């Protein structure tokens, strides 16, 4: 809840902050950058290296100083410090935000736009999903430094143990498939698991790992991030293009249809669980997993005995040709309270250095951060000596280039995300609700709840 509480405090403070001229002027001798990465983490180290290279390349300009601030839980440690800086009217020149949160900060008047200060053509170098993530009301505010992705992984030993006709249901890494086909495969796996004595299934608990246990633990965004694509793939969404209209969108017939297909995972005998074991897929307790891109390095480095393969995130239908796969991540933004034009130009120059083609390639090499720059996507190496790495990144690279879609931009996104994850995605799983009427009620109730909260944005 800490992350959500930030926005409540911001909204109550921002008008006084904006109205008053600052008693503090930025230190002209340095440009301060805050990030949410721990200093000793590969992500924090890559930022520090990038800042160091900027200072070396620009000996006569203002020095850039970076502070990598460890975040806790859903980013609360970092967010708490940022909130305190906002309250004190002492924000850093540049700081990082999770992409979906940009709209809320823009609505509060805390961020400065970037379009008129960027080098010509620089914005066009980002992938479309990253441009969309950083754009609010047609203006660009956030330079994404890392993209993300979600795919389906499967336990190779388990799949190899299946009868030939069931193995034939598994797509190759360069094939699209549908949610119905995913459910069919999951059902066949579960049926086989309950009758076999094959050692690959010795620890089997559930067909599919969904990581829903993260939602009640406070990581609401994971549920929204993983499963909003079901709606996108059915020409639906969780909020309208205006970012504030939910009724008639979240609870549309198309949303009900999409989530009814998701709910088939919980039809008895259930194929997934709201209370799955920790590291279910990692420890051989599930055959399939809806998996974030971070699984790749985690599995290779920490679970070397697990043989896993990766295929594309399922479409809602074969005819779906639009953007639908999960994407987006943290981005660099600038202090919107700064009024010195020369300093703004210097600040944006630093932001470009932190997110340009070269930086994007470095971040992938040092931390596995999916490149956000079109010319840097080829930095993703799919020809290593590890076939599991190669397959996973082939799939993720394809999705970045062809199907990734940014999450909705909304001033109330944190509340929207929390409500959708808890009151719809998790609730369907917990109650094993599979009928359209019940799912429609969950969506109607969630839409009503969000509309009440969003009334303040419509005045």
Image (tube, rainbow, N blue to C red):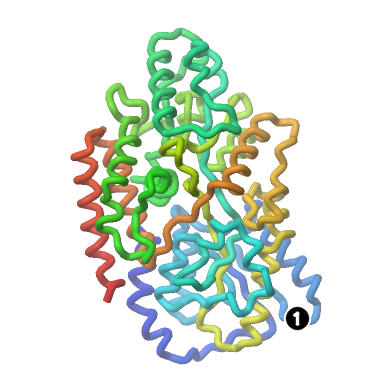
Residue 256 pos. (x, y %): 28, 43
Which picture quadrant has residue 316? top left
Q: In this view, does 258 lie to the left or right of 37?
A: left
Q: Nearer the viewer, residue 156 or 136?
A: 136
What is the quadrant of the C terminus in the image?
Answer: bottom left
Residue 249 pos. (x, y %): 30, 55
Residue topped by disc 1: 61
Q: Is residue 182 above or below residue 203?
A: below
Q: Is residue 336 in sight in this rendering?
A: yes
Q: Which element type, helix, strand or loop, lies under badge 1?
A: loop
- Which residue sits at x=49%, y=44%? 321
In this rendering, the count of numbered labels is: 1
- Which residue sits at x=63%, y=65%? 124
Q: In this view, does 118 lie to the left or right of 188?
A: right
- Which residue sits at x=62%, y=60%? 126
Is the residue marked by circle 1 packed among few (<14), some (14-19), or many (20+) residues within 10 Å? some
- Which residue sits at x=54%, y=76%? 113
């Amino acid at each position: 809840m800490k992350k959500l509480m930030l926005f409540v405090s911001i909204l109550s403070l921002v008008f006084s902050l904006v109205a008053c001229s600052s008693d503090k002027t930025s230190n002209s001798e340095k440009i301060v950058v805050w990030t949410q990465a721990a200093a000793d983490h590969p992500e924090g180290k890559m930022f520090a290296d990038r800042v160091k290279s900027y200072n070396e390349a620009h000996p006569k300009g203002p020095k850039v100083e970076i502070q990598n601030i460890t975040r806790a839980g859903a980013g609360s440690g970092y967010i708490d410090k940022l909130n305190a800086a906002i309250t004190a009217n002492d924000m850093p020149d540049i700081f990082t935000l999770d992409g979906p949160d940009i709209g809320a900060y823009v609505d509060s008047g805390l961020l400065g736009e970037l379009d008129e200060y960027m080098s010509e053509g620089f914005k066009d170098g980002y992938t479309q999903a990253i441009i969309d993530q950083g754009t609010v009301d047609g203006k660009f505010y956030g330079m994404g430094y890392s993209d993300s992705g979600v795919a389906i992984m499967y336990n190779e030993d388990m799949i190899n143990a299946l009868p030939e006709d069931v193995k034939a249901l598994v797509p190759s890494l360069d094939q699209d498939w549908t949610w119905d086909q995913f459910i069919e495969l999951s059902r066949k796996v579960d049926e086989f698991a309950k009758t076999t004595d094959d050692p690959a299934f010795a620890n089997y608990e559930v067909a599919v790992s969904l990581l829903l246990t993260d939602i009640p633990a406070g990581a609401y965004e994971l549920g929204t991030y993983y499963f909003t694509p079901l709606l996108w793939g059915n020409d639906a969404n969780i909020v309208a293009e205006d970012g504030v209209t939910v009724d008639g969108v979240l609870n549309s017939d198309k949303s009900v249809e999409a989530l009814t297909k998701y709910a088939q995972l919980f039809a008895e005998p259930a194929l997934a669980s709201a209370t799955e074991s920790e590291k279910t897929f990692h420890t051989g307790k599930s055959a399939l997993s809806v998996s974030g891109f971070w699984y790749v390095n985690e599995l290779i480095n920490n679970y070397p005995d697990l043989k896993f393969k990766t295929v594309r995130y399922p479409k809602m239908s074969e005819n779906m040709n639009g953007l639908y796969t999960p994407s987006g991540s943290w981005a660099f933004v600038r202090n919107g309270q700064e009024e010195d034009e020369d300093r703004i130009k210097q600040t944006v120059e630093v932001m470009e250095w932190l997110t340009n083609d070269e930086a994007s390639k470095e971040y992938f090499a040092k931390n596995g951060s999916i490149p956000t720059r079109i010319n840097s996507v080829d930095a993703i190496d799919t020809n290593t000596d590890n076939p599991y790495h190669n397959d996973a990144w082939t799939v993720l690279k394809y999705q970045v280039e062809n199907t990734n879609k940014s999450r909705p931009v909304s001033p109330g996104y944190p509340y929207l995300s929390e409500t959708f994850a808890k009151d719809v995605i998790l609730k369907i799983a917990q109650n094993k609700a599979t009928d359209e009427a019940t799912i429609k009620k969950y969506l109607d109730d969630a839409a009503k709840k969000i509309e009440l909260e969003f009334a303040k944005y419509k005045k």
